[in-house]
Image (cartoon, grey):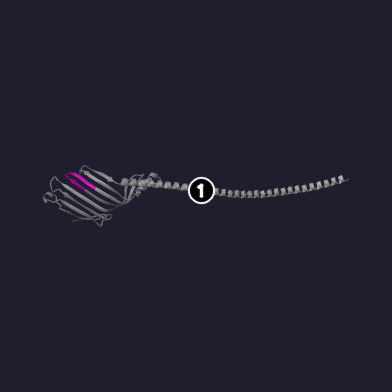
């Protein structure tokens, strides 16, 4: 049994069947370690087997598991114009590797959670860089997978991650948000212009209503004047007609009187 103290805490574990001649011992070397009171790690476990019992058929394997590994201030991309920094994250890691008959293979799964990504942009950064920085801030989790293959002297690593897909979705979200913001600003500006035009129209309509009221008043006054004039004209016509009738009657009476006088005078002359 071993106890290994490292800066982050203590590793405790056990190594079994330690020997330089596994063929004679007939058992492979095995080991396992776990973290105890390790800073920045919730759980950690390392185990493996070195099996060289059968000459020429060595088979070695190891597995590493860690849960709740805290990452702080890790520079992902060092670029003067757009430096990307992982300021905080919690990672669960599960990795395994095996070497058999000279062939090497392995797998790694790393799940990043509670991610805080950002970019230390300068004030002169452009709109696209600001959108990308906002999109990075929207990525709260991602996964990295790796496949190891080859041999100890010549191996390759194939990486796969959903980070690019998540970042693309975050970029789309940022673009949609900016389009929605622009549309809202345009709509607000148009609404303000419509409201202003409506206020001006209301004022003009109010003026027209005032003019309409004056016109109605003048029309009423004209109607009253015409009615009064009609009444006065009818009264004048009636009066004139009455005067004419009176004059006609007076003329008749006078004509009758003159006729009577003439008849009486002729009568007197004839009697003479």
Q: Which one is in front, 235 or 63? A: 235
The quarter in which the N terminus is drawn is: bottom left
Is 102 within the magenta?
yes
Please, which residue is most extreme toward the front here? 271
Q: Secondary structure at mark 1?
A: helix
How far from the left and from the top, in percent, is residue 118?
Answer: 35, 49
Tell me if mark 1 has few (under 14), some (14-19) or many (20+) residues whose alpha carbon lies within 10 angstroms of its own.
Answer: few
Horizontal placement of 72 versus 263: left or right?
left
Query: Which residue is labeled 1 in the image?
Result: 198
Magenta extent: 97-107
Horizontal placement of 3 versus 204: left or right?
left
Residue at 66% over, 48% down: 230
Magenta stretch, main secondary structure class: strand
How far from the left and from the top, in percent, is residue 77?
Answer: 32, 46
The answer, for residue 21, to whether it is visible in the render is no
Residue at 38% over, 46% down: 176
Horizontal placement of 61 versus 270: left or right?
left
Residue at 73% over, 48% down: 245
Is 101 within the magenta?
yes
Please, which residue is most extreme toward the right here? 272
Horizontal placement of 121 versus 58: left or right?
right
């Amino acid at each position: 049994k071993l106890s290994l103290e490292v800066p982050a805490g203590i590793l405790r574990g056990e190594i079994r069947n330690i020997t330089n001649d596994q063929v004679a011992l007939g058992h492979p070397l095995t080991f396992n370690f776990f973290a105890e009171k390790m800073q920045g790690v919730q759980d950690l476990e390392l185990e493996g087997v070195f099996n060289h019992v059968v000459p020429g058929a060595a088979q070695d394997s190891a597995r590493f598991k860690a849960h709740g590994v805290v990452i702080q201030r890790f520079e992902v991309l060092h670029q003067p114009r757009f430096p990307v920094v992982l300021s905080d994250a919690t990672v669960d890691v599960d990795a395994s590797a095996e070497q058999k008959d000279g062939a090497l293979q392995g797998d790694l799964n790393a799940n990043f959670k509670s991610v805080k990504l950002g970019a230390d942009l300068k004030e002169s950064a452009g709109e696209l860089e600001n959108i990308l920085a906002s999109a990075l801030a929207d990525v709260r989790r991602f996964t990295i997978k790796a496949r190891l293959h080859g041999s100890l002297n010549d191996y390759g690593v194939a990486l796969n991650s959903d980070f690019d897909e998540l970042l693309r979705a975050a970029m789309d979200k940022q673009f949609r948000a900016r389009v929605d913001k622009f549309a809202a600003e345009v709509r607000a500006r148009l609404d303000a212009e419509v409201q202003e035009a409506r206020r001006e129209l209301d004022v003009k309509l109010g003026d027209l209503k005032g003019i309409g009221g004056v016109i109605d008043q003048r029309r009423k006054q004209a109607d009253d004047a015409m009615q009064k004039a009609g009444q006065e004209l009818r009264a004048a016509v009636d009066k004139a007609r009455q005067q004419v009738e009176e004059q006609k009657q007076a003329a008749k009476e006078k004509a009758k009187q003159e006729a009577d006088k003439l008849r009486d005078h002729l009568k007197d002359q004839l009697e003479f």
